[in-house]
Image (spheres, grey):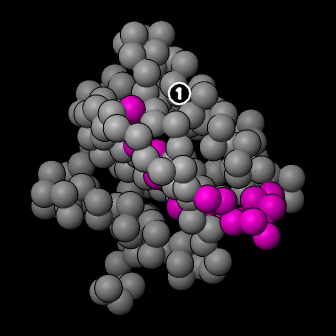
Amino acid sequence: MRTKRPEHLKTFSYRGCHRYSLTFCTDSRRCHFVDASNVEIVTQQILRAATQMQFVVLAYCFMPDHLHLVIEGQREDADALRFIKLAKQYSGFYFSQARGQSLWQRYGFEHVLRDDELTLVAVRYVLQNPVRAGLVSHPKAYPFIGSQVYSVDELLEAVADLPST
């Protein structure tokens, strides 16, 4: 399944201490992320790319056929487009080595988060994804959510008081 190529913002550099909500879909929407070992392979490489490119992963959720990330640049030279490329390249390579299959669709989706409230809304969306999909009744019961810098409890506490949308 091919998706239409999403457009990047033409007047935005994607560099600096900005936050982003990202979604990467698996090739042909295969359900690779029901297996903990697959999630582990990909998580290691996403975090490797984040460290190299001066980003932190504030929240992530591996759904069966896609990945949600909320990331934040840590320096003025942090390059989100380069992070996206490396994260997909590293994880796709190691996944292919281990499983003999391609991992990602060619394009993903990104949304620039302009303020703290939007970041928390994006984090809540990521954490609630498995609940909305009917996979679990509470985010804590889902094994494939987390953060590079916060515990799941800290994330859930941070979004608990947000108004319902």
x then y, percent, for residue 119: 54, 72
Tell me: residue 55, above or below residue 114. above
Task: Determine the residue positioned at 53% across, 78% down.
Answer: 118
**Magenta stretch secondary structure, dominant:** loop
Front residue of 112/78: it is 112
What secondary structure is marked by label 1?
helix
Q: Amino acid at mark 1?
A: Ser
Q: To which residue does mark 1 refer? A: 91
Q: Is residue 60 visible?
A: no
Q: Residue at x 63, y 80 (%)?
A: 115
- Seen from the viewer's position, the closer of residues 123 and 151 is 123
User: Callout 1 environment at 10 Å: few (<14), some (14 to 19), or many (20+)?
Assistant: many
The part of the chain drawn in magenta is 7-27
The extreme bottom residue here reads: 163
Visible residue check, residue 82: yes
Q: Is residue 24 magenta?
A: yes
Rendered view: 5 above or below 120: above
